[in-house]
Each structure stands twice: as C-alpha cells, then as structure tokens.
Image (spheres, grey):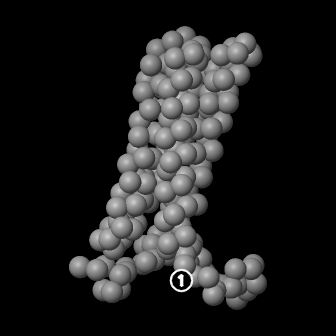
Amino acid sequence: MQSRLRVQGHPIQPMLVTFPYGLFVSAGIFDLTDVIGGPAFLGEVGYWTAVAALVSAALTAVAGMVDLWDVPGDRTRATAIAFNLVNLATAGLFLLACLIRADSPQRGASVALLAVEVLALAVGGIGVRLGARLVRRFDAGRAAETTSLDALDGVAGSTVEIVTPTRSLRGR
C-alpha cells in the first residue's frame, strides 16, 4: 500500500507523528521538573509544549485519516485504526491536562496532572509499537529501493506528492 501523501515516495504521516510524540515527552519532562521543585516557569513551558504537541497531533491525525482511506480491509486496517485511536487517546489525555491547567495563573503542573501525562505517554508507547508495525508492513515492498541520498540526484521540481491510488490499492 502506498500513502496518498508522500515526500520523495515516503509517507508523510510516519514523519509527522514524531513531532507530537517528542513534544508530549518534552512536556512531561518539563512538568516533572516543575513538580520536583524546579523553577516555576518550567510548568508554563510544559503547558505550552503540550499545546504545541496537540496542534501537531491534529495535523498528524489529518494525514492519518487521509492514509486510512486506502488501507486494505484486513488486519492492516485494524492495526491502522487502532494506531489512530491510540494517538487520539494520548492527545485526549494531554488535552484534559491542558484544559485543567488553562485557568491557573502560572499553568504549573501538579502531581495529579503529571500522573495523567505519564498515563498518556504509556498509551502513546502502544501507539509507537503499532506505528512501527504499520511502517514495517507498508515498507516491505520498498526494501529493494535505493535508500541513500544518491537517490535525490536529478530530482527537479516539487518532491511532495499527493497522488490518487490505483484501483488495485483501494481493494473495493
């Protein structure tokens, strides 16, 4: 299966998903530091990092929904749906933490909010495993392709593609 949204033939969503995960982990680290007695501004930094993660998670979800459209109706589709739902749960838990903190003056973290974030990161870890499974399944056909930067020689024009899948990929 090939993704509709690609850069140089590689699907965009696996590239995008690293941003919200990295930002969620960073927010958790900032909040942990705030809770254990670090400078108070780290709580606010953690809050805004989580907000940035939520924005990037929304963009990643859009790419995931576009890709989900063409996933064959087998175990791969079930894995892709589970992956997107797990990512939604992770973002939902962080959204809950952000909404609770939004009205506080310095948006600092508490032990309870940190526990919610740790739970969200644990759920996100399941998403990482599911995402790795999907990438291995989708990239199995790409193993014989050139993977060095030499593959970019002679590339002219735009390298971002939005393609219409062929009939055989739709499976409908």
Left or right? Give the position of 62 relative to 21: left
Q: Position of residue 155 (x, y in %)?
A: 66, 84
Q: Is residue 31 visible?
A: yes
Q: Give the secondary structure at mark 1.
A: helix
Q: Position of residue 42 (x, y in %)?
A: 69, 22
Residue under the point 60% across and 52% down = 18
Q: Position of residue 127 (x, y in %)?
A: 49, 50
Quadrant where the image shows the C terminus: bottom left
Above or below 30: residue 107: above
Q: Residue furthest left?
A: 172
- The quadrant holding residue 168 is bottom left
Q: Residues within 10 Å of mark 1 (few under 14, many from 20)?
A: few
Above or below 139: residue 38: above
Front-lying residue, 80 or 31:
80
Q: Is residue 160 visible?
A: no
Q: Position of residue 100 (x, y in %)?
A: 44, 19
Q: Which residue is mark 1?
A: 141
Residue under the point 44% across and 60% down = 63
Residue under the point 65% across and 16% down = 35
Front-lying residue, 1 or 5:
1
Quadrant where the image shows the N terminus: bottom left
Residue under the point 45% across and 72% down = 3
Above or below 45: residue 55: below
